[in-house]
Amino acid sequence: MKAWEATVRKTQAAAKKRANTIFGTSYAVDPNIVAGAGAGEGEEENESDHHPNHEEDEFHASGEVYHAERFLPNGDYYTGYWADNFPHGQGKYWWTDGCMYVGEWFRGKSMGRGIFSWPSGAMYEGNFKSGFMDGEGTYTGAIGGTYRGAWVMNLKHGHGVKEYVNGDSYEGDWSRGSQEGQGKYQWKNGNHYVGEWKNGKICGHGTMHWTNGNVYEGNWEDGLPKGNGTFKWPDGSFYVGHWSSDPGEQNGTYYPSGSLLEGGNLEWDPQEVFSKDLKECKVCATEKVPIWPSQKKLAVWRSSKGSDPSVRPRRMSVDGRIDAGVDKDLGGMRLSDGAAPSPWNVSAVDRAGNEGDDVFVGLQCEGMMNLRGTPLRIPKMVKRQGETISKGHRNYDLMLNLQLGIRHSVGRPGPPPSLDLKPSAFDPKEKFWTKFPPEGSKITPPHQSCEFKWKDYCPKVFRTLRMLFKVDAADYMLSICGNDALRELSSPGKSGSFFYLTNDDRYMIKTMKKAEVKVLLRMLNAYYNHVRAFENTLVTKYYGLHCVKLNGQKVRFIIMGNLFCSEYMIHRRYDLKGSTFGRLTDKPESEIDANTTLKDLDLNFIFRLQKTWFQEFRRQVDRDCEFLEQERIMDYSLLVGLHFMEASNDDITPSGSVTPIDNGGSDEAVPRLSRADVDQLLLDPAGWASIRLGINMPARVERTERNNDAAEFQLVGEPTGEYYDVILFFGIIDILQDYDITKKLEHAYKSIQYDPNSISAVDPKQYSRRFRDYVLKAFAEDT
């Protein structure tokens, strides 16, 4: 500790005197301080003249890895290998608050094996990825207690063993920092539970063993017996029934052993299990970590050679991100208070000193050295999609009718929906017409539009689907029927359908052909059973099917979830089918913006998911494709949206690196999370509640390049080693096209002119196989 304190004093003193960063960028310094330092500390002045930081005055080629020692102006200290202004290779970093990391670095990020220690005495030893505790590792708490097992982004995730300070232990599955799945918890006194867990609590089916020989086997909820179960005693007595901590819901039968029958003791209160047996069987809470390794900031400065000396460079976090936060000047250091504005906004200050030069908006790329290709261009930001439907719009009356009908359908009183629906609820004839006269009626309100008729298809089924998808009826009506108008997308899709978005972007409304309505009604029972069975299904979520008859013309439409409803800005979006014919965007690059939907031949990434997510992704793609194949559906797509997390403003693009650059665009951009908000979401376990398969998923993408000289055409290019941190969104859309006579004729006609394997119109079985094969090449495990 004395050595550490000496190092801190030494580096802080040197920082005050040198008044320059480790890259030689000069700042204005009070001459009185300099004079005072020179007069009173001659010996230390001498020492600083031979300071190890001076070695950087030597020229090092781009990409060269060399050993360096850095005494940083804020008192931090680094020693180890260095390349292009970043820790790179083996190295040790001390923070002035006492935290320390020793291990492998990659371009300024802790990456590989390492040890992170806290001043409290806590320590983590294991694998790191992009600054996060990620992979296999062991965490030892400040007051004892250890966890050995799998981690994902600082959270226990996978199989692991936890030994608590009080002597309890748990071995089993973890998810997002809490026990979830199968596991065994053993208390210090010898009692133990083996079974299912959910969100850190005993939940599901499991067995509790007490040291006195008593056993409970059955269902649990929130750490207590709930539902069917059996309690057994060592003497052979047992109790079978429905369990609940509420005595009014408890119901069962007590079967005493032969010895008890002889003694005449036939009384037993099952509530004793709750009041006595389970009284001391409390599961220990997970310890709190004051700061995660990925939240630690590196006092590593980007070179600002040739720029305005009044503009200070940005400070980096340990996972390699540039901090765009509100700054506090602390002894010449630029520290963030976490209130970070969007890194996409390049202020006038950021542009200072770059007149005549290109100002790049770059993304942090892990493979910065010896990379191939051209800069990755991020489409320009645009205003919100769609044209607001206001009075005078050609579809204004249709919008009013739609809103009136939805309010009537959803707000109509009825019995609470049950998940177990009768077959009659799925009957295609289960539809109801309602007349809406302008003056109103007993069941409809007066309105300013002309008279129209409204049809509900299978209302019980869609009401139950909304409950299954956890859609609140009031919020649903507010989104669609509130004071805010709908927005019509600028052009209809290839199918001729029109699309409308709610103002909050939560729901999309699509007009449908009669044939599509028939397909949905035919497969509705199978669709309901599929989404009920698989919570992580990727197929589109449908909330309502309706029809408006206005002036003798019928307009059918479906209400579905908007996959890209998020606080994140979607920088790129892809519609992927696995075919090649016509699968290239026909827009020039200058016209491609954030709302442009790119296709298979535009894709130049491999999407890399964490191991557990990738395994679940593979399983779910197989399930969904099997379902669609059974229903004779084809021509569906995987819609993918990318939000690049590592957006930053760099004055200089390092030589040999490939940095994504911005096309420019509107100042009035779509609302999005700041860098600090993104960090908070990913670091706070509570934020993981919003992360599901295909929704808000932290991942990485690796850039690819197609080899034009290859013997066979490459639908997925070769990896280049360029990685970008992203938030991923994806789902399977357009699932209402069956292989009808029209598609069969299209297949026959196009097969004469083109390769039959390159076209979209193929048999559902072939389509499913090709789609699966392609998707599982475009997505891979992040190793």
Image (cartoon, rainbow, N blue to C red):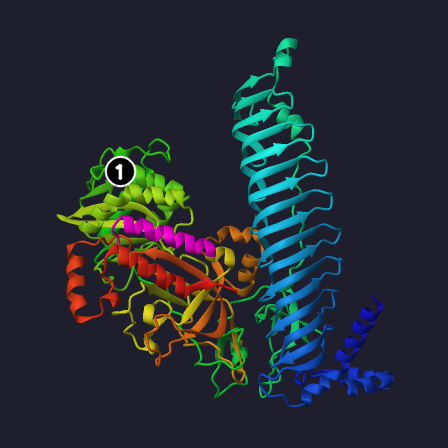
Note whether residue 670 is visible. Answer: no
Report whether 353 appears left or right of 663. right
Tell me the residue at 22%/38% (across/down).
Answer: 431
Q: Give the x, y percent position of residue 136.
A: 61, 59
Picture quadrant of residue 56? bottom right
| Amino acid type assigned to the residue bearing label 1 in the image | Phe
Please name the residue shown 38% across and 68% down the image. 594
Q: Estimate how packed mark 1 is, as few (under 14), some (14 to 19) or many (20 or more) residues with alpha carbons within 10 Å.
A: many
Find residue 771 and report its horizontal and vertical position in percent: 32, 60
SS category of the residue bearing label 1: helix
Instruction: Please tell me which residue lies in front, 595 or 268.
Output: 268
Left or right of 294 in this view: 439: left
Name the image quarter holding the N terminus: bottom right
Number of marks: 1
In this rendering, the answer to whether 222 lies above or below 261 is: below
Asked if the stretch drawn in magenta spans residue 628, the answer is: yes
Asked whether residue 346 is drawn in magenta, I would say no
* Residue linked to disc 1: 426
> Can you give x and y, in whole percent of width and height, for residue 168 in the image?
70, 42
Which of 727/473 is in front? 727
Residue 304 drawn above or below residue 750: below
Q: On the rendered structure, is 44 left or right of 315?
A: right
Q: Residue at x 26, y 33 (%)?
A: 424
Q: Horizontal and vertical percent for residue 222? A: 56, 37
- The residue range painted magenta reads 615-633
